[in-house]
Amino acid sequence: MSFLDGHDLVFIEDLRIQTVIGIYDWEREITQTVSLDLSMAFDIRKAGVSDHIDDTLDYKSVAKRLITFVEASEFQLVEALAEHCARIVLTEFPVSRLRLKLSKPGAVRGSSAVGVIIERAADA
């Protein structure tokens, strides 16, 4: 059984954001693209009946909040950036669990991207 099995999911896929990220001196002087994929546990049944935005998880608000945060951040590690993004979603939005994939495209020659996938719960 997967971490998010049995939950309704709202997702954001390939949210590309420019930020300062990396451990090397040259990386601290430029912005690079990171990509976020989020699967967020949220019971959508009420919204499915009402057809009203107030009854669901507003993924546009989640995306805007993460864009604002990531663009202003200057983390060295993708691990730290991923943890902070997860904490924002779990504390500022009605999400009980999430899976977050943070990719850094082009970071390793020969690969399309590298990064981390984390799963977190609001009560943890």
Image: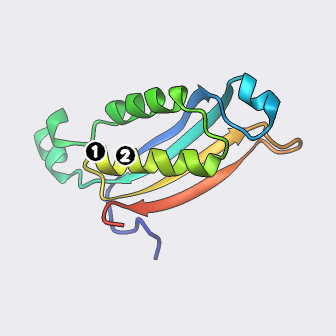
Label 1 CA crowd tier, 10 Å (few <14, some 14–19, many 20+): some
User: Of the residues shown, which amino acid type is indicated by label 1?
Assistant: Phe
- Residue that appears at 80% across and 32% down: 25
- Considering every residue shown, the one lying at the far top of the view is 30
Residue drawn 76% across the image and 31% down it: 27
Please indicate whether residue 50 sits to the left or right of residue 56 in the image.
Answer: left
Horizontal relation, residue 111 to residue 18: left or right:
right
Q: Quadrant of residue 7?
A: bottom left
Q: Amino acid at mark 2?
A: Val
Q: Secondary structure at mark 1?
A: loop
Q: For mark 2, does the 10 Å Cα neighbourhood hold few (<14), some (14 to 19), or many (20 or more) residues? A: many
Would you say 46 lies left or right of 44 here? left
Please give the residue where the numbered disc 1 appears in the rendered image.
Answer: 93
Name the residue nearer the viewer: 71 or 95: 71
Residue reaching furthest to the front: 25
Q: CA distance from mark 2 to mark 1?
A: 5 Å
Where is 68 relative to 123, above or below? above
In which quadrant will I find the C terminus? bottom left
Q: Which mark is residue 66?
A: none
Mark 2, secondary structure of its residue: helix
Residue 10 visible to the viewer: no
Q: Position of residue 35 (x, y in %)?
A: 60, 37
Please give the name of the residue rendered at 53% of the width and 26% of the height, measured from the top-left corner: 71
Viewer-closest of 71 and 97:
71
Residue 114 or 83: which is nearer the viewer? 83
Q: Position of residue 41 (x, y in %)?
A: 34, 56
In the picture of the structure, the residue carrying the numbered disc 2 is 89
Q: Does the image show residue 119?
A: yes
Furthest residue in direction bottom, as rendered:
1
| Residue plotted at (69% across, 40% down) | 104
State yes or no: discs 2 and 1 in contact (Cβ < 8 Å). Answer: yes
